[in-house]
Amino acid sequence: MRIEDRLLVRRFNAGDAQALRRIYEKYRPDLLSVARALLKDPSAAEDVLHDVVVSFASQAGRFALKGSLKGYLAICVANRARNVNRRSGPRGPAGEVQRHRPQRGNACQAASDAERCQIVTSAMEQLSDAQREVVALHVLGAMRFREIAQQKGESINTIQSRYRYGLKKLRSLLNGQVDL
């Protein structure tokens, strides 16, 4: 676990609201990317993140971290997204897979980026939920396979296989349209 995260958790458990704010600001972009990639409704990503942060905040004073703080929060987001998807029925369009939208003045480049994002989003939709989750946590959440395995209580071989098969399927689906 990172030293900064240990200190933040210690301050958070001591009731320091600034520590919770720092945790939120530090991990918000990656956690939103994971939520958007896993949710049927991309507009629900903020709600999922908010719910996870509120739930996390309620643990102040008694939160015991055993692994990576980012990994713990990313798994919480993935679990919450899975629950939201179950309640909302059959899968519709996927959330945005793109981590950050580049701010460019060139309209042609922006259109190309949006098209590329849509192509990848459609391909991600065709992965199994388990593969999509591992790909999102590893690529967008920047989690290591070992962290994902520990947080999910599964073997690292299972996680790596899901990732490998997910990428293989994405490559097949994209067929050279986008570089992975």
Image (cartoon, grey):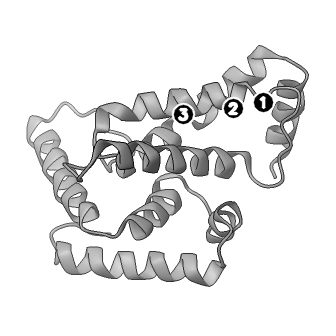
Query: Callout 2: helix, strand or loop?
Result: helix
Measured as percent of width and height from the top left, residue 162 is found at: 46, 77
Going from N to C along the chain, the mark reached first, 2 or 3, is 3
Report how far apart the C-alphas of labels 3 and 1 lie in the structure: 18 Å
Q: Which residue is mark 3?
A: 28
Is residue 35 something that shows in the picture?
yes
The mark closer to the camera, 3 or 1, is 1
Q: Quadrant of the C terminus?
A: bottom left
Q: Which residue is mark 1?
A: 59
Query: Callout 1: helix, strand or loop?
Result: loop
Query: Image point 59% across, 51% down: which residue?
Result: 75
Q: Locate residue 83 relative to residue 104 in the image: left or right.
A: right
Query: Callout 3: helix, strand or loop?
Result: helix
Q: Which residue is mark 2?
A: 56
Examine the rendered structure and indicate whether residue 104 appears above or below residue 115. above
Amino acid type, label 1: Gln
Q: Locate residue 15 relative to residue 89 in the image: left or right.
A: right
Q: Residue 102 occupies which quadrant of the picture?
A: top left
